[in-house]
C-alpha cells in the first residue's frame, strides 16, 4: 500500500482543498492529513480559525479522499510522522516548494502540487470582512 501525507489548517473547506486532497490521494492508496491544531495555528502560525480543530477534523473525515486525520502540533513532526506512518509520498502546495525536500533523505517522495489559484481561505475571510464593512 502506498501511503501519502499532507498537512494544513483546512479552515473554511472549499473546492481548492478538495482539489488538493483529490490529487494527493491519486498519488497513492491511503491519504493521511496532518491537521493543524488550534494551538499550533494560534501560537506558531499566527492564525485564528473560524472552525475548531474538532469541527475541521470532522469535515475532513467526511471527505472520501481522506483515510486518516492526525493532529499537527509543531513544524518538526513531519519527519517523525513520515516514519511513524510509513509514508511513501509527502504532498504540499507549491507555495512550500523546497521547504520539505529534506524528507527525501528518508526515502519519501516529495511532491508540490499547484494550488487552485482563484480560491483560498484567506481570500474568503478577506472578502467576508469587506462585505461586512459595506453592510455596516
Image: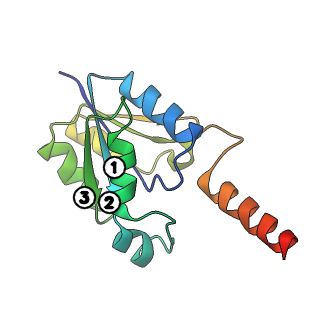
Whether tag 1 and tag 2 are in contact, CB under 8 A, the answer is yes
Q: Toward the viewer: 114 or 17?
A: 17
Numbered disc in front, either 2 or 3 = 2
Image location (x, y in percent) of residue 10? 46, 52
Numbered disc in front, either 3 or 1 = 1
Residue under the image location 41 percent in, 30 percent down: 24
Which numbered circle lies on residue 54? Answer: 2
- The CA distance from mark 3 to mark 1 is 22 Å
Q: Around disc 3, counting alpha carbons within 10 Å, would you say few (fewer than 14), some (14 to 19), or many (20 or more)? A: few
Note whether 132 is above or below 96 in the view shown. Answer: below
Residue under the image location 43 percent in, 75 percent down: 42
Q: Which tag, 2 or 3, sits closer to the chain's start?
A: 2
Residue under the image location 34 percent in, 65 percent down: 37
Name the residue at the left extreme. 84
Quarter of the figure with the C terminus: bottom right
Q: Is residue 96 left or right of residue 40?
A: right
Q: Hey, which quadrant is residue 60 in on the image?
A: top left
Image location (x, y in percent) of residue 43? 40, 78
Q: Around disc 2, counting alpha carbons within 10 Å, would you say few (fewer than 14), some (14 to 19), or many (20 or more)? A: few
Q: Is residue 133 left or right of residue 16?
A: right
Q: Which residue is mark 3?
A: 77
Q: Around disc 1, counting alpha carbons within 10 Å, would you say few (fewer than 14), some (14 to 19), or many (20 or more)? A: few
Image location (x, y in percent) of residue 33? 32, 44
Q: Toward the viewer: 103 or 11?
A: 11
Query: Mark 3: which secondary structure?
Result: helix
Residue under the image location 74 percent in, 68 percent down: 129
Which numbered circle lies on residue 58? Answer: 1
Q: Toward the viewer: 133 or 90?
A: 133
Determine if residue 71 is in view. yes
Image location (x, y in percent) of residue 15? 58, 37
- The CA distance from mark 2 to mark 3 is 20 Å
Query: Mark 1: which secondary structure?
Result: helix
Amino acid at each position: 500500500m502506498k501511503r501519502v501525507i499532507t498537512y494544513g489548517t483546512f479552515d473554511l473547506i472549499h473546492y481548492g482543498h478538495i482539489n488538493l486532497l483529490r490529487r494527493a490521494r491519486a498519488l497513492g492508496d491511503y491519504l493521511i492529513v496532518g491537521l493543524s491544531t488550534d494551538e499550533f495555528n494560534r501560537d506558531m502560525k499566527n492564525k485564528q480559525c473560524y472552525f475548531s480543530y474538532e469541527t475541521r477534523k470532522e469535515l475532513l473525515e467526511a471527505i472520501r479522499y481522506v483515510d486518516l486525520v492526525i493532529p499537527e502540533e509543531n513544524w518538526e513532526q513531519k519527519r517523525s510522522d513520515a516514519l511513524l506512518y510509513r509514508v511513501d509520498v509527502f504532498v504540499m502546495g507549491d507555495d512550500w516548494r523546497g521547504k520539505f525536500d529534506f524528507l527525501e533523505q528518508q526515502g519519501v517522495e516529495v511532491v508540490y502540487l499547484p494550488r487552485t489559484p482563484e480560491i483560498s481561505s484567506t481570500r474568503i475571510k478577506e472578502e467576508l470582512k469587506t462585505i461586512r464593512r459595506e453592510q455596516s
